[in-house]
Amino acid sequence: MIDQRVIDRLKKKDEQAFEYVYQETKRGVYSMIFSVIKNHQVTEDIMQDVYMKMMTTISQYKKQTNFKNWIITIAKNQAIDYYRREKRIVHVDQTDYDNFLSSPEPTPDERNQFDLMIEMLSEDQRSVVILKIADEMKFKDIAKVLEKPIGTVIWLYQEAIKTLKRYEG
């Protein structure tokens, strides 16, 4: 949990506070960027930009708001800015994504199945599913990050699950 004391230390450029914040937020930041960019190397580059931007804009963080949502919103905006600048289709490097998020190495069959399943989802569904499952975010937080009504986020998640169940069966 990132509380105000950690944020105050972060404002003073405390390296331990930065490391703590990074460890607490890296999965969500990575997931958000990857859901837009779909490329491991570019995602890692943008992650660095996100944490640099976090440090330069930490004074703008409003007390009593959810810090994790704040940084994931920065990640989303950085990813969208990159995507708009590139204006091209970026191919998914799903193998690297799996390696980043999973502790035990998935088998090639598991990786291929995940690739096929995630590709079946729309862009919005993929973002919701990745944030919900990989980062264990609550629907209300996902709604804030994606700037969508909570009902829409829940509906996207349910539709994604239905799509994935059809794939299984």
Image: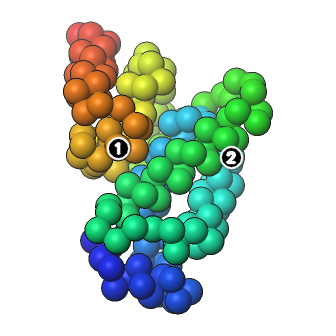
User: Is any atom of residue 33 visible in this view?
Assistant: yes
* Residue 25 drawn at (x, y percent): 42, 62
Give SS at disc 1: helix
Which label was assigned to residue 144? 1
- The N terminus: image quadrant: bottom left
Residue at the image point whose x is 67% and y is 41% from the top: 81
Q: Residue at x 33, y 79 (%)?
A: 4
Pick the quarter of the image with the C terminus: top left
Q: At 41% across and 79% down in the image, what residue appears?
A: 7
Q: CA distance from mark 1 to mark 2?
A: 24 Å
Crowd tier of the residue under label 1, counting other residues whose Cα lies within 10 Å: few below 14, some 14–19, many 20 or above: some
Question: x, y (%) of residue 155?
Answer: 24, 21
Mark 2: few/some/many CA within 10 Å (<14, 14-19, 20+): some
**Amino acid type of the residue that numbered disc 1 sits on in the rendered structure:** Lys
Of the image marks 1 and 2, the number of the one nearer the N terminus: 2
Left or right: 33 in relation to 62: right
SS category of the residue bearing label 2: helix
* Percent coordinates x, y for residue 166 in the rendering: 27, 10
| Residue at point 52%, 72% (across, down) | 58
Residue at which label 2 appears: 42
Q: Position of residue 70 (x, y in %)?
A: 43, 58
Vertical arrangement, residue 8 with respect to residue 113, above or below: below
Q: On residue 94, which mark appears?
A: none
Q: Is residue 15 above or below residue 33?
A: below
Res. 30 in view: no
Q: Is residue 105 above or below residue 139?
A: below
- Kind of residue sitting beneath label 2: Val
Residue 160 sits in which quadrant? Answer: top left
